[in-house]
Image (tube, rainbow, N blue to C red):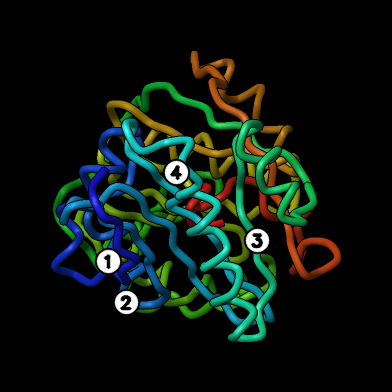
Amino acid sequence: MAAIEDVVLGHADIADALLLSDEARWNQTAADWAVFIDHGEVFGVRAGGRLVATAAILPYGGGFGWVSMVLVTADWRRRGLASRLMNRCIAALRARGCASLLDATPEGALVYGRLGFRSQCGMARWRGEGFGKVSGQPVTQLQSVGDGLQRRIAVTDCGEILARDSQVFGGDRNFLLRNFLDRPGSAVIEDGRNFVVLREGRRATQIGPLIGSSDAEARDLLEAALAAVSGSVILDILDAGKGLNRVLGKHGFEAFRGFERMVLDRHGLPGEPAALMVAAGPEFG
């Protein structure tokens, strides 16, 4: 058996990390991996120089951080590497005075439950096809998309959106949303208080986060988002956003994977969970 080595990943390791997320058929891009490296920590295990497992943390302020990117290549599974890396993540967040939050598959929830995590709500991943197109030309002015909604591409002034996200999410992930919105092809649709972000993923356009003050406002945002992209789309609907399921079903989307949002070292979810209807993704919260 090859000797294993615990490592902390840097930018030079992103290509190796992408091999793991591609093997799992996840949607993360190199830019997503860079977010964890720049704003959190990515722990890994190398065997004979090959990266065979990862896990990452992303602190958000507000006394909590996200744990994600728990990946183990197929021929190294069931050897305790995921638990080994999870313990590193938990310890790293505790050293920062942070509770740990994560989105787990049903199988993962059983493992994380033994580590002390407790489920707070559910989440379902949906997939389908968008029926529009976002212009590839970045613009700074607002564009009306009807019913009082506006679309922005290449946002330079998004202070109101960031403040609203911090209020609802319960932590400061301004760096993350700015990173999303600075990427080519990204957009945000908003009505002054509610908003939804669209960004390109490795395999599909990712819709989320979506923050809505009511089911009706959230449905309007989702309809506008689906009309603004073409091709494969995925989005992660939290329990608070179940009212959006009818919209997705109408457009031929299907739910194909479930998650549980879990917490460790705190009671309950931060922020205003009732208004957080679509996640940024299980890796980002």
Residue nearer the viewer, 55 or 141: 55
- Give the mark nearest the N terminus, 2 or 3: 2
Q: Amino acid at mark 1?
A: Ala
In the rendered image, residue 184, in percent from the top left (x then y), is placed at 19, 57
User: Residue 181 sits in which quadrant?
Assistant: bottom left
Instruction: Answer above or below: position of 68 versus 64.
Output: above
Instruction: Answer above or below: position of 265 versus 280.
Output: below
Disc 3: which residue: 101
SS type, badge 4: strand
Disc 4: which residue: 207
Disc number for residue 34: 1
For the residues labelled 2 and 1, the Cα–Cα distance comes to 6 Å
For the residues labelled 2 and 3, the Cα–Cα distance comes to 19 Å
Disc 2: which residue: 38
In the rendered image, residue 67, in percent from the top left (x then y), is placed at 54, 60
SS type, badge 1: helix
In the rendered image, residue 74, in percent from the top left (x then y), is placed at 34, 31
- Verify CB contact (< 8 Å) between mark 1 and mark 4: no
For the residues labelled 2 and 4, the Cα–Cα distance comes to 23 Å
User: Residue 23 sits in which quadrant?
Assistant: top left
For the residues labelled 3 and 4, the Cα–Cα distance comes to 21 Å
Residue pushed farthest right? Answer: 267
- The mark closer to the camera, 2 or 4, is 2
Residue that appears at 44% across and 43% down: 207
For the residues labelled 1 and 3, the Cα–Cα distance comes to 20 Å
